[in-house]
Each structure stands twice: as structure tokens, then as C-alpha cells.
Image (cartoon, helix red, strand yellow):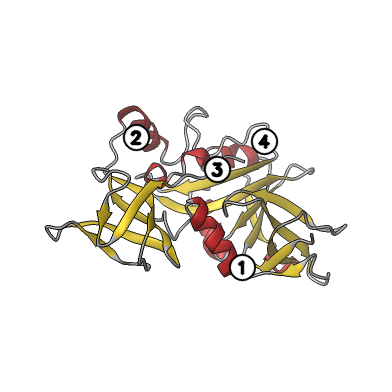
């Protein structure tokens, strides 16, 4: 079976400089020490999610950041917001690459860079190929991938978890290190881990769903909002007081959303 792929708007930014490794380690949620490939969240000081990136350490000691949902200039602004006297340089390399998401089989192309990901609920890869190279697979569709993601109950940034959400509310614990030391938003992450004081949770939902649909109790109180939807499947951010199996607004609440580990 040949790989299926769709073009992606992934931003590609290279981080270089003597302080690159230490700087990135102190800014994002992932523990990058000894890791060739990591998923990382970038939080604000209140612990809310600003961005998700794949962080790949290159052989020359630089780092490639792949961001599926921000343009390169916006990503650079997030990543370098706290550069003061650090020897850190962020360079937009997006124009150098054709960018895809592939699934179904491992793409085969000698000069491609492949980054495995579980964020679609199936085995998939972020793929970078030189700008002039041929596509390494057969055309697929984003709708197909989105359906697979929602069927698996896998959250997405920023559709399900963005600037108003904590990672733990949305099942993104796999992308948060609680043991690596200080980083932006770390104190909030530690407090949530120790106290478990969440008021909302992202759950799978089934029924007549659409993005933005308010889920109301019989008393008319808004208990949640659908964040992602495809057909009869979706993900909704709802009150933690609503248990699995509860039906609100004709929609059945399922298991909590979870990001599979790499």
C-alpha cells in the first residue's frame, strides 16, 4: 500500500546559536534532553496553550521546529518572546520545503525528512521534501484524517486546546513534562498536577454535533461546547461534573480525549 498524503501549511523554523538547546529547554513543555524528536507546547505565564510544535534535533546541533497551525512569523514571535541576551537565532525555512502529512504507509523518498506523529489517531508522518521534488505518495484528504482523529478521540491544537485552555483539560498531558525543571507556565502545570483542580474536560461526543454547538442541561445551563466535529463524532469541552454516558442537548458524552504518546 502506498503512502497517502495531503499538502500541509506547516511552518518550518530552524533554531541555531550556542544557547539554542538551553533556551528551548527553558521555554517549552517538553524535556528535550537526549530526545531526537519531541512534541512541545508553548504556554503563556498562566499555563494556557499558545502553540504546538514538533521539535527535531539536527545532527549539527540546531533544532527544526515544525508548527502545523501558525505561520512562521507568528511561531518565531512565540518562540523568541523571551530572548534577552541569549545566543539564539530563529530562521524561517518554510520556503525551502514542500510540506505534507502522510499516513497509510511510510513515505519513500531519498531526500525527504520524516517525523512520525500520533496526533491524528493513526500512524502518520510530517513530511518535508525539497521544494522541487515530487510528492512521495498518493493524494488523500484532510477530511479523512480529521475523521480518523475524532474517531480516536485525539485532541488538536488550537481547535480543541488553545489560548483559553490548560493542556490537562484537553488530554495533552503526554506533551507536558513535570520533572524537567523550570519553563514558562511550569508553576501552573505543577499546581494542576498536585491539586487536580480542573473544572472542564475534553470528551468524545456522539450525536448531531457541529463546531460551536452549546451543550445544555435540561435546566438550560450551558455545560459545554463542541470544539471539533465530523459527521456524528466530535470533541467537546464540558464540565467535569458531567460523567461519561450523560446525554445533553441530544449528544452523548464519551471517554476523555487523549493524545497518544509517541
| Quadrant position of the C terminus in the picture | top right
Residue 140, image x, y percentages: 67, 69
Disc 4 target residue = 35
Mark 3 → mark 1, Cα distance in angstroms: 23 Å
Mark 2 → mark 3, Cα distance in angstroms: 20 Å
Answer yes or no: is residue 193 visible.
yes
Q: Of discs 3 and 1, which sits in the foreground? A: 3
Label 4 SS: loop
Mark 1 → mark 2, Cα distance in angstroms: 33 Å
Q: Please count the marks in the image.
A: 4
Residue 37, image x, y percentages: 67, 42
Which label was assigned to residue 260? 3
Label located before the other in sequence (3 or 1): 1
Answer with left or right where residue 56 lies relative to residue 181.
Answer: right
Label located before the other in sequence (4 or 2): 4
Residue 43, image x, y percentages: 44, 47
Mark 4 → mark 2, Cα distance in angstroms: 25 Å
Q: Residues within 10 Å of mark 4 (few under 14, many from 20)?
A: few
Label located before the other in sequence (1 or 2): 1
Between 164 and 146, which is closer to the camera in this rendering?
146
Please report the residue visible at 45 percent of the width from the left and 58 percent of the height from the top: 158
Mark 1 → mark 4, Cα distance in angstroms: 25 Å
Label located before the other in sequence (1 or 4): 1
Q: Residue furthest right?
A: 110
Label 3 SS: loop
Which label was assigned to residue 9? 1
Residue 64, image x, y percentages: 68, 51
Disc 2 target residue = 192
Label located before the other in sequence (4 or 3): 4
Amino acid at each position: 500500500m502506498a503512502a497517502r498524503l495531503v499538502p500541509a501549511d506547516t511552518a518550518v523554523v530552524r533554531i541555531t546559536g550556542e544557547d539554542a538547546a538551553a533556551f528551548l529547554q527553558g521555554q517549552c513543555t517538553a524535556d528535550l534532553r537526549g530526545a531526537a524528536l519531541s512534541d512541545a507546547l508553548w504556554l503563556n505565564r498562566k499555563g494556557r496553550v499558545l502553540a504546538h510544535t514538533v521539535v527535531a534535533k539536527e545532527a549539527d546541533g540546531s533544532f527544526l521546529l515544525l508548527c502545523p497551525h501558525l505561520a512562521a512569523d507568528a511561531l518565531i514571535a512565540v518562540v523568541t518572546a523571551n530572548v534577552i541576551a541569549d545566543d539564539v537565532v530563529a530562521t524561517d525555512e518554510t520556503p525551502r520545503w514542500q510540506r505534507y502529512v502522510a499516513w497509510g504507509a511510510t513515505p519513500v523518498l531519498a531526500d525527504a525528512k520524516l517525523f512520525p506523529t500520533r496526533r491524528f489517531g493513526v500512524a502518520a508522518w510530517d513530511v518535508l521534501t525539497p521544494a522541487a521534488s515530487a510528492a512521495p505518495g498518493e493524494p488523500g484528504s484532510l477530511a479523512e484524517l480529521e475523521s480518523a482523529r475524532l474517531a480516536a478521540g485525539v485532541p488538536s491544537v488550537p481547535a480543541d486546546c488553545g489560548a483559553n485552555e490548560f493542556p490537562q483539560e484537553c488530554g495533552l498531558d503526554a506533551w507536558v513534562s513535570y520533572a524537567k525543571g523550570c519553563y514558562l507556565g511550569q508553576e501552573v502545570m505543577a499546581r494542576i498536577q498536585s491539586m487536580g483542580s480542573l473544572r472542564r474536560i475534553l470528551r468524545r461526543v456522539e450525536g448531531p454535533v457541529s463546531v460551536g454547538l452549546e451543550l445544555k442541561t435540561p435546566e438550560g445551563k450551558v455545560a459545554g461546547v463542541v470544539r471539533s466535529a465530523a459527521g456524528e463524532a466530535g470533541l467537546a469541552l464540558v464540565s467535569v461534573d458531567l460523567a461519561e454516558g450523560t446525554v445533553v442537548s441530544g449528544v452523548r458524552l464519551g471517554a476523555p480525549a487523549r493524545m497518544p504518546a509517541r
